[in-house]
Amino acid sequence: MTCPLCSRSGENLLWEDAHCRVIRVDDADHPGFCRVIWHAHVAEMTDLTAAQRAHLLQVVFATEAALRALMQPLKINLASFGNMVPHLHWHVIPRFADDRHFPQPVWGTPQRDGRRHEPPDDEVLAARIADMMMA
């Protein structure tokens, strides 16, 4: 079975280094949705060394900070499941009180039609993530 996160096919890459990358997920209901993906095919955080775990979380937090600064969401949801794709990755999802699923999880039952929030420009978001990684 081919891992879709190993193949990198069709990704909208925002930022990457030797260990992981940040992509923007095309989700009309949840603009700004990003995924932080560890390059090596491992399933769990404990498959990484302590230093690797710290680095991955630094990237997750930099992505969160960039989205907060650019979108001013009510909340950011962070999730790492891997049930469907057992390749270590984190979802970083801006949430708004008027989004389609709020206050339910983005994978839950829709609560309303939802208001469309504009995602940040990819280049602006990529630059902000890079800036946050330098901070």
Image (cartoon, rainbow, N blue to C red):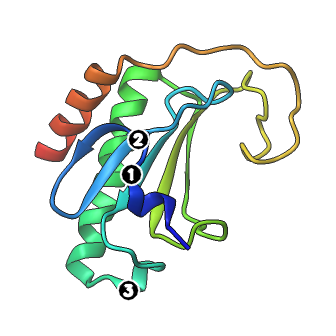
Give the amino acid at mark 2.
Answer: Glu
Nearer the camera: disc 2 or disc 3:
2
Q: Is residue 95 above or below residue 107?
A: above
**Residue 95, how many percent across, how many down?**
62, 33
Contact (Cβ within 8 Å) of mark 3 with mark 1: no
Give the amino acid at mark 1.
Answer: Arg
Quadrant for the C terminus, please. top left
Q: Which residue is mark 3?
A: 47
Classify mark 3: helix, strand or loop: helix
Nearer the camera: disc 3 or disc 1:
1
**Distance of mark 1 from mark 2, alpha carbons?**
6 Å
Quadrant for the N terminus, please. bottom right
Which of the 4 image quadrants contains residue 68? Answer: top left
Q: What is the number of the mark on residue 11?
A: 2
Task: Using residue 11 as the reference point, say whether residue 126 is left or right of it.
Answer: left
Q: Which residue is mark 1?
A: 8
**Residue 120, how many percent across, how many down?**
41, 19
